Each structure stands twice: as C-alpha cells, then as structure tokens.
Amino acid sequence: MAMEALSKLMDQISPAHQEWVESLSRERQLELLKMWEDHGGNTELGNIGSDSNSVDPDALIEKFRKH
C-alpha cells in the first residue's frame, strides 16, 4: 500500500525531486509520505474523506529536505 502512495506522490513532483526521493532509504520515504499526509496530501493511507491535495508536493519536498 505504501508503494501506491509513493507512486501517487511521485506523479505530482518534479523529475529532480523524483530522483531525490528514489535515492532515499525506505524509512525516509515513509517519513516523507507521513509528512505529506500530515500536510493534507492524499496518500490513501489515512485522511479518510480527503481526495484532494491542499499542499504543493514540490514545496513539501523542499521542506522535507531541510528537515
């Protein structure tokens, strides 16, 4: 299920960010998914009833990179 969520996020980010996310460890990828979901991104792992993203995925990646 996490792979599907990661795929949804990857579809929404720039190619440069896609490469960076792919280089992350599995644990860091899951942290990123959790952060995205916490900020309103729809990963379908939670956020029941939410079917739209209220956060810019690329902006969130930038924030996560500094984290």
Image (spheres, helix red, strand yellow):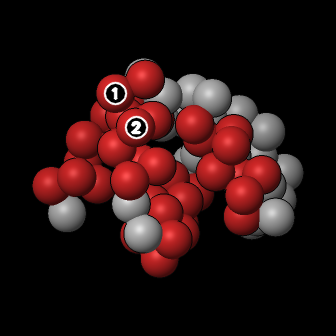
* Disc 1 residue crowd, few under 14, some 14–19, many 20+, Cα 10 Å: few
Q: Secondary structure at mark 2?
A: helix
Spot the residue most to the top.
Answer: 14
Spot the residue most to the left.
Answer: 66
Kindly check if marks 2 and 1 are in contact, taking CB atoms under 8 A apart as contact.
yes
Amino acid type at circle 1 is Ala
Spot the residue most to the bottom.
Answer: 27
Q: Nearer the viewer, residue 50 or 56?
A: 56
* Disc 2 residue crowd, few under 14, some 14–19, many 20+, Cα 10 Å: few
Q: At 43% from the left edge and 23% from the top edge, which residue is drawn? A: 15
Q: Say which quarter of the image contains residue 2.
A: bottom right
Which quarter of the figure is the N terminus placed in?
bottom right
Q: Where does the image place residue 8, in percent across and percent down from the top left?
A: 69, 39
Q: Is residue 16 left or right of residue 67?
A: right
Kindly tell me whether residue 23 is visible in this rendering: yes
Kindly tell me whether residue 60 is visible in this rendering: no
Q: CA distance from mark 2 to mark 1?
A: 5 Å
Q: At 77% from the left edge and 52% from the top edge, which residue is drawn? A: 4
Amino acid type at circle 2 is Glu
Q: Where does the image place residue 53, in percent across and percent down from the top left?
A: 62, 35
Q: Where does the image place residue 36, in percent across and percent down from the top left?
A: 50, 53
Q: Is residue 53 left or right of residue 3?
A: left
Which quarter of the figure is the C terminus placed in?
bottom left
| Residue that carries the numbered disc 2 in the rendered image | 19
Q: Nearer the viewer, residue 10 or 37?
A: 10
Q: At 79% from the left edge and 39% from the top edge, which residue is drawn? A: 51
Q: Which mark is residue 16?
A: 1
Q: Secondary structure at mark 1?
A: helix
